[in-house]
Structure formats: C-alpha cells, structure tokens
C-alpha cells in the first residue's frame, strides 16, 4: 500500500494528471458561473433538498421524500440512484447552496472521468495514450448531452466510474494486491449506487472483461473475481435489494410506456456518425433536436484501431506479439461495435426479447459505453505513433490530435442559457418548487393510487366522515403528527396528505391502530373515537430493507477487516 502511493509513484503521474485537469477546464468552465441552468431532468435541486431533510430527520438510508409526488410523498430514494445525492449533502457542510452543489457535482464528474480514464489508458498505452484517452472521454459529445442538455446527474457519475472499474479489475487480476481488490469492490459499488440503468447495461461487460483478463493473463484468480462481484453487490444491498424486490409496491409500467417506449428512441446512422446538429430538445425520432452523435474523431480513431487489428490478422504486423495492447484492442473494439449496434434499430429484436432491457428506456443510452470504448481506443493512437515516429514529432502529432478533439467539441459544453439570478430561494419556492414536486410523479407512484393528483397536496389532513377538528399538523420525511378533537358518537375518519406505502404505521395516543388507503387518491386514512387525541405516523422499514441495511453494514465492516488483515501480511 505504502509502495503504491509512494512519492516516486505519485511524481510519475502528477504532471500528466495536471495536464488532464488543465485540458478539462473548458468543459466545465460554464459550471463555475453564478446561477443555474435549465435541463431535462430538472429535479436535481429538490432531490438534494429531500436528501438533506432525510439526514436531518435521521432517516438514513433515505427512502421516503415527503415533498415529492406532488407533496403527497414518494419513495424516491428507495428506487432512484442515491450516491451523487449522498455526496452532494457532504458539500452542505461548507454552506453551499443546492444550485451550486448541483453544478459542483457535474464538474467533479467531468474532471474525475478524465482522471480515471487516464489510469486505464496509461496501463495499456503509456502516459501519452492515457492523456489522449482521458481528453477524448471528457470531450465526448454524449458527455455534454448528459450534463448540459439532459442534466442526468446520476448517469454522469456512473459514466465517471466506468474506467476506474475496468482499471482496478485489470490490476486485481494481474497483481492480486488487497488494495486493488478493495478498490475494485468500492468502484463497482459506486456504479451500482449511481445509476440503475447504467448498472443494467454496464455489469454484463464488466463480467466479460473480468473473465477476458483472467483468460489472457493466465492468472488463477477466479475466486477473487467471484468474491469481487459478490462483495460489490452486498455492499450495495441497502439500495439494490429494495430497488428491485420492492418494485411490486409501485406502478412501474409508466417507466416503459408512451414517451419512454424504447421503440421511439433509436438513433439513426446519420445521427450517430455524420450529423453535428446540437439542440436542447428531446430524442423522439430520427430528426430529434437532441444530439446523438458519437463524435467524428471518436468513431474515426475507433475505426483506425479496428483496421490495425485487421492488418495484424492478415499480415501479422503492427503488433510484435500478442501483448496486452493487442488483447485490449480486441475487447474494446468489440465493446464499441456492440454498443453502437444497441443504439440502432437493427437491435430491435434484442430489445424486445432480452429481460429487463426495456427499462433502459432509451437505446441511445448505450452511447455511454460507446464513448467509453471509443475514448480508450483513441489512446492507442499515440502508442502506435510512438513505434512509427520517433522523438518530438510523435508528441506533436499526439498533441494535435488532443487539441483537435477539444476544438471540435468544446462548444457543446455549455447550457442553453444560464439564469444568473437563480438561487435556492427561487428554485425552492413558488411555481418552481411546485413544478419540481410534480415532476416524475408517475415514476414511483404507490400502486394503490387510482387517480394521480393534478394539484399539490393540501397543507393539512381532512375529515373524510364524522366530525372532528384537526390542528397542529406537522410532517417530516419519516414522521407526521397531529392533534384531533373528534366529536359525536360515530368515529371520525381522517385523511392524511401522505401516500400510503410500506411501512407507514399509525399511532393514536401511543397505540398502534389499523389504517388503509382504499380511496382513489391512495392516501392514508384512519379512524379515531370521540375526544382529543394525539396521532403520530412513522415510516418504518420493511423486513427486506432492514436485511439489506444489515448486509451493507456487515459487508462494509468486513471489507475494512479484510484490508487490514491482508495488508499486515
């Protein structure tokens, strides 16, 4: 461990990493501006606010968001990717506004994606190849789409960790050091908790990569690889298990219907390879306003790598032997071709028949893997030039390639408009707040809701039947309380502006009472008898959530113990 992070090793990379960071600055410069910008997924601020409320209430892990679902509450973080929002709350310690934290998170995802790609590229192509791959990854057009058009915070973070996972898996198989095992586990854990769809489409290729590296290196580390996947899953259990097993509690048909039907979102050849059109609209049809381009230099150098492989197989030239560079080109060329294929309508039979793939919603999401593979392949160019052009000319040509991709694509890395006046006070009040509360209403709507609300939830509970006065109502993330003064001989039935969802429990004068949601709104209803009562509602975990939390805690603790024990040896 000490040797790995020694001054000598750090000095070797510090200059190259500095170059990567400096070259990345134009990509995130607009994020340093004052204000906020519009995006497709304009819920980042309210998600962060809801996460903070969970922390303040002690609801950790956060599962129920009280202000979403049009103010009736929503199990957002029981199903939706959590890591970027947990990270975002850390920056609240420094007094940053939510609008600034969102921009900071986007900035970090861009910068770190380049750093991680540098280490992967350097492993196979040397420092110059690593820098080239890093810059190509940062300036891939789809990266700009994700951040400045779609505002896909969770997806952008998952993409950030792709090269880190691949690099650490390679190092684990090659060297078997505990630091690489722990790093690989944590990096895949970060993908798992950053974005559900990226987990779905990325995991099969990580599995293939792991066994591919095992095969070409001849290392006997099959057990370590299996343990790596198992430990990553167990570490992510607090999120993955409820997200997949408790789907039965919410209406998920809306995730794949109407606008989200994958059949409407295939990319055309023109969009992928030729068009440099840039817009901020949606992705419906071949003439959509959202850019789905791979990037001219990205696909051009990917084709060059493919050509190098073909030449080798025909002439046995270019590669002096079947080394790791040769094998990496085979894998990443295959990944590039497969990923491009899945963005296009030719892959329709696979989309219609592969289980769960429809939940990816947009075939163009495979562009995440396209830019990952094509950026890696771009790193091969300086490696190849090194064998063809000696000395400074090689560096100059490589520098020209690096600057070319920046010049060609940096204009994409800016928002449509920057609202300089935007602050948290504006974003979390009035119409802006109501709009965010109602956004994504149908994504995780509790199953018993028959009529989705068209208006924001009322501030207070109401009397459904009988007679009662209700006052002192308070609602938090996992708790609500009220005082009810019921009158008359018949019990008063009260409705609460909170969607029912497992496991809300109602207590009247500290005694648990039954409740139901057999109403069109799907909200909590209960009865109280004559007199004055204190009513409290608590959002409890299901047995599965408790189990999942325990698995995560045990896995985290045991990972620390594993690392300490292995390092001492």
Image (spheres, rainbow, N blue to C red):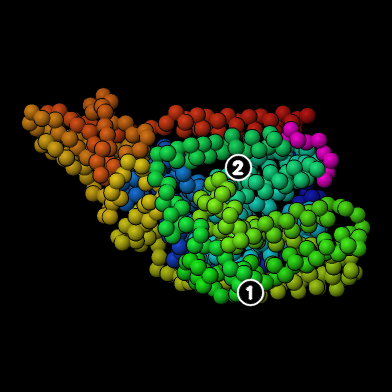
Residue 486 in view (yes/no): yes
**Tag of residue 27:** none
Quarter where residue 534 is shown? top left
Mark before the other along the chain sequence, 2 or 1: 2
Residue at the image position 26 percent from the left and 27 percent from the top: 513
Between disc 2 and disc 1, the foreground one is 1
Q: What residue range appears in magenta? A: 216-224
Camera-nearest residue between 64 and 302: 302
* Residue 97, percent from left and from top: 44, 57
In the image as oriented, which residue stretches furthest toward the top? 511
Instruction: Report which residue position mark 2 lands on.
Output: 189
Q: Quadrant of residue 30?
A: bottom right
Q: Is residue 449 above or below residue 541?
A: below
Does residue 487 appear to the left or right of 299 in the view shown?
Answer: left
Q: Is residue 46 visible?
A: no
Q: Magenta segment: does it hold 285? A: no
Q: Is residue 221 inside the magenta stretch? A: yes
Q: Is residue 212 left or right of residue 158?
A: right
Q: Are marks 2 and 1 in contact (CB under 8 Å)?
A: no
- Helix, strand, or loop for circle 2? helix
Residue 203 percent location from the top left of the image = 63, 46
Quarter of the image with the C terminus in it: top right
**Could you tell me which residue is drawn at 40 percent across and 54 percent down?**
440
Q: Which residue is mark 1?
A: 274
Q: Residue at x 34, y 55 (%)?
A: 438
Vertical comparison of 262 with 182: above or below: below
Q: Is residue 378 above or below residue 2?
A: below
The residue located at (40%, 68%) in the rendering is 421
The local secondary structure at tag 1 comes to helix
- Label 2 crowd bin: few (<14), some (14–19), many (20+), radius 10 Å: many
């Amino acid at each position: 461990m000490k040797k790995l992070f020694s001054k000598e090793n750090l000095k070797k990379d510090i200059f190259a990493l500095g170059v990567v960071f400096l070259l990345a600055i134009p990509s995130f410069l607009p994020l340093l501006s004052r204000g906020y910008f519009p995006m497709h997924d304009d819920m980042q601020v309210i998600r962060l606010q809801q996460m903070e409320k969970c922390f303040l209430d002690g609801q950790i892990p956060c599962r129920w968001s009280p202000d979403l679902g049009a103010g009736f509450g929503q199990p957002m973080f029981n199903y939706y990717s959590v890591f970027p929002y947990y990270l975002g709350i850390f920056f609240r310690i420094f007094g940053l506004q939510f609008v600034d934290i969102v921009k900071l998170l986007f900035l970090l995802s861009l910068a770190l994606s380049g750093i991680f790609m540098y280490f992967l590229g350097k492993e196979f192509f040397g420092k110059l190849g690593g820098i080239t791959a890093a810059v190509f990854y940062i300036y891939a057009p789809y990266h700009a789409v994700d951040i400045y058009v779609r505002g896909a915070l969770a997806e952008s973070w998952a993409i950030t960790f792709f090269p880190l996972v691949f690099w650490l898996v390679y190092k684990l198989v090659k060297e078997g050091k505990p630091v690489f095992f722990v790093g690989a586990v944590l990096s895949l854990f970060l993908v798992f908790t950053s974005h559900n769809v990226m987990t779905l489409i990325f995991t099969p290729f990580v599995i293939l990569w792991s066994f591919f590296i095992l095969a070409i290196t001849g290392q006997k580390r099959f057990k370590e690889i299996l343990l790596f996947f198992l430990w990553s899953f167990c570490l992510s259990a607090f999120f993955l298990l409820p997200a997949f097993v408790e789907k039965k509690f919410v209406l998920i048909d809306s995730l794949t219907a109407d606008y989200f039907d994958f059949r409407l979102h295939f990319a055309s050849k023109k969009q992928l390879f030729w068009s440099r059109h840039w817009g901020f609209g949606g992705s419906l049809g071949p003439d959509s306003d959202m850019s789905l381009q791979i990037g001219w230099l990205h696909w051009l150098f990917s084709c060059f790598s493919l050509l190098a492989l073909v030449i080798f197989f025909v002439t046995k030239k270019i590669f002096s032997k079947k080394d790791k560079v040769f094998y990496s080109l085979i894998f990443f060329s295959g990944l590039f071709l497969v990923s491009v294929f899945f963005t296009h309508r030719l892959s329709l039979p696979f989309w219609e028949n592969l289980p769960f793939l429809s939940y990816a919603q947009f075939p163009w999401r495979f562009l995440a893997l396209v830019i990952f593979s094509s950026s890696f392949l771009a790193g091969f160019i300086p490696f190849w030039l090194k064998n063809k052009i000696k000395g400074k000319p090689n560096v100059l040509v490589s520098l020209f390639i690096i600057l070319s991709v920046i010049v060609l694509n940096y204009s994409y890395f800016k928002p449509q408009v920057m609202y300089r006046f935007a602050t948290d006070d504006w974003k979390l009040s009035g119409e802006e707040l109501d709009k965010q509360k109602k956004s994504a209403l149908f994504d995780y709507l509790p199953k018993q809701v028959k009529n989705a609300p068209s208006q924001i939830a009322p501030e207070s509970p109401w009397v459904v039947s009988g007679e009662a006065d209700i006052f002192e109502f308070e609602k938090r993330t996992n708790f609500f309380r009220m005082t009810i003064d019921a009158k008359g001989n018949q019990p008063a039935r009260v409705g609460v502006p909170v969607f029912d969802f497992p496991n809300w429990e109602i207590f009247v004068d500290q005694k648990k009472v039954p409740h139901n949601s057999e109403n069109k709104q799907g909200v909590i209803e209960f009865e109280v008898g004559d007199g004055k009562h204190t009513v409290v509602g608590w959002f409890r975990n299901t047995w599965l959530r408790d189990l999942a939390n325990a698995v995560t805690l045990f896995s985290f603790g045991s990972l620390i113990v594993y690392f300490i024990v292995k390092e001492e040896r």
